[in-house]
Image: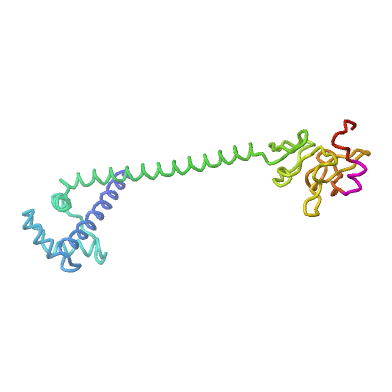
């Protein structure tokens, strides 16, 4: 019984759509928005040789389009004629074509949803991979910093592109260039009475809390060896 009601409901929905399409076509064909019942009565007689009275079309219009009266269910031959007017072989053909259209639309919707889900999943995966392999830390190697992926090691530091590019340890001698335009271009640290020289200001790459100072002429005279010296 429930299935029978569902079938009837589905047929009524199809008839509703059929009527809407018939009157839409009549508006386009006639170029008018009124007198459609009379137009359809004449059209069906002339082209389909089917006499559906103007009164019947008026009842269809008021029942299915304006909803001013109760709908009347057309007989099967009338449904076939209305379907013919729209270019279908019969009402059954109309039903099959609409069913196929519905399936196609549902498949397109499912495909669209699946595509969006895949895009979101791939975007999330790419983001995770990029974040996982992103080199957002740096570590001191010999005389310079190198980018690495953060792992929580003691010697790691948060990535600083400026320090990464400009902070390097250098060997100097008395003929080295220490100043440009009066500003120190070499900096030094002193730790356990050991002097080291760097190309920029900053914290010592190994000793925490030890920071560089701009080199002075006093330091150059007292701590920088001659260029031809082999004594460290």
Q: Picture coordinates of residue 134 (x, y %)?
A: 64, 39
Check the picture and name the quadrant holding the C terminus: top right
Residue that appears at 36% across and 43% down: 108
Report whether 121 appears left or right of 218.
Answer: left
**Residue at horizontal 36%, vertical 44%?**
106
- Please identify the quadrant where the N terminus is shown: top left
Q: Is residue 81 left or right of residue 230?
A: left
Q: Vertical placement of 179 versus 205: above or below?
A: below
The x and y percentages for residue 221 are: 91, 44
Q: Nearer the viewer, residue 189 or 90?
A: 189
Q: How far from the left and from the top, in percent, is residue 49?
A: 5, 54
Tally the marks.
Answer: 0
**22 on left or right of 191:** left
Q: Tell me, yes or no, whether the highlighted magenta stretch contains residue 90.
A: no
Front-lying residue, 14 or 12 = 14
Residue 29 percent across, percent down from the top left? 16, 61
Which residue is outermost to the top?
A: 230
Colouring style: rainbow
Toward which corner of the image does residue 171 lie, by quadrant? top right
Q: Which residue is rendered at x = 79% and y = 37% of the image?
A: 155
Please name the residue shown 68% across and 41% down the image. 136
135, above or below 63, in the image: above
Magenta part of the protein: which range? 216-223
Q: Main secondary structure of the magenta part?
A: helix
Residue extending furthest toward the bottom: 34
């Amino acid at each position: 019984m429930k299935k029978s009601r569902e079938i009837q409901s589905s047929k009524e929905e199809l008839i509703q759509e059929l009527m809407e399409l018939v009157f839409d076509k009549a508006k386009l064909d006639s170029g008018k928005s009124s007198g459609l019942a009379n137009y359809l009565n004449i059209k069906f007689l002339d082209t389909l040789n089917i006499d559906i009275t103007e009164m019947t079309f008026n009842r269809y219009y008021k029942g299915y389009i304006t909803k001013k009266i109760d709908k009347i269910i057309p007989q099967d031959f009338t449904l076939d004629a209305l379907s013919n007017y729209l270019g279908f072989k019969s009402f059954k053909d109309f039903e099959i074509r609409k069913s196929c259209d519905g399936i196609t639309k549902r498949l397109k919707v499912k495909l669209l949803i699946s595509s969006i889900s895949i895009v979101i999943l791939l975007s999330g995966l790419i983001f995770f991979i990029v974040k996982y392999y992103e080199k957002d830390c740096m570590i001191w190697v010999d005389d310079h910093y190198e980018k690495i992926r953060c792992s929580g090691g003691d010697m790691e530091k948060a990535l600083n592109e400026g320090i990464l590019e400009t902070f390097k340890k250098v060997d100097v001698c008395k003929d080295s260039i220490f100043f440009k335009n009066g500003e120190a271009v070499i900096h030094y640290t002193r730790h356990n009475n050991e002097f080291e020289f760097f190309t920029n200001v900053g914290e010592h790459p190994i000793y925490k809390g030890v920071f560089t100072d701009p080199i002075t002429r006093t330091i150059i005279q007292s701590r920088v060896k001659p260029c031809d010296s082999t004594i460290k």
